[in-house]
Amino acid sequence: MTRPPNSSFAAAAWSRRRLLRYAAGGSLGAIAVGLLRPRTVASAEPKLELLCSMFPQNSRCTDYLPGSQAIDETGEPIAVDALLPTATPGQPVPVRGLPDNQTTYLVIQTGPTIASYGIRPICTHWGCTVDWQADQNRFVCPCHDSQFDSEGRVLAGPAEEPLPLATVVVRQNRIGLVDRAPSVEPRQGL
């Protein structure tokens, strides 16, 4: 006994064939696109940039300066051997170089040495730009008078959080600024 052509068995067989045809065609199409697509050689630099930005002390980063180079007000790169003899520990040094071209302050530690972080002078209360007041030895916000010490910790409110940080990397007499906070909070007492 033969079944009529419009039975459910014939419809199910036709649906399976259709599904297999679409699957095979899609697979061949994906392979063709993969073969015809132009090949590009990926540079190792972006991967190294990310690695050295996040982990500057990694052994693969000994000769690589991540981020952008710190520059002075005239746009000249800052050399470590020229900066440190004139720097005073506890007195932040203003530099530029991050993509937003806003000032970042290098923290000078006893030695003198440059700390592994820099201070972004953006008040955590309302986002105003704070200024370093050398005569008061602190950062002062012109909007609501929040005050921060030379490492960016809150001395007086209304701000409740310390100033944001950027990562600083010193390599081969150059200073690199990375627009990312250090992976570990370097300031004590927070």
Image (tube, grey):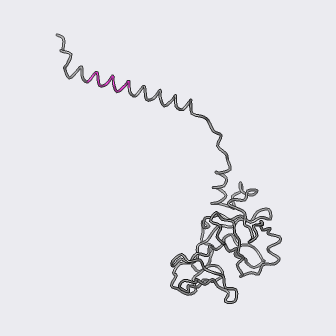
Q: Position of residue 15 (x, y in %)?
A: 29, 25
Residue at position x 53%, y 77% in the image: 124
Residue at position x 64%, y 70% in the image: 102
Q: Nearer the viewer, residue 6 or 140?
A: 140
Q: Is residue 150 magenta?
A: no
Q: Is residue 29 left or right of residue 111?
A: left
Quadrant in the picture for the N terminus: top left
Q: Position of residue 103 (x, y in %)?
A: 66, 72
Farthest residue in the bottom direction? 136
- Which of the 4 image quarters holds residue 128? bottom right
Which residue range is magenta in the image? Answer: 12-21
Q: Main secondary structure of the magenta part?
A: helix
- Which of the 4 image quarters holds residue 93? bottom right
Q: Nearer the viewer, residue 94 or 169?
A: 94
Q: Please determine whether, in this image, residue 28 is positioned above or below residue 71.
A: above
Q: Nearer the viewer, residue 6 or 57?
A: 6
Q: Please determine whether, in this image, residue 60 is positioned above or below residue 152.
A: above
Q: Position of residue 169 (x, y in %)?
A: 71, 65
Give the number of callouts.
0
Q: Position of residue 132 (x, y in %)?
A: 66, 82
Q: Please determine whether, in this image, residue 40 is positioned above or below residue 14.
A: below
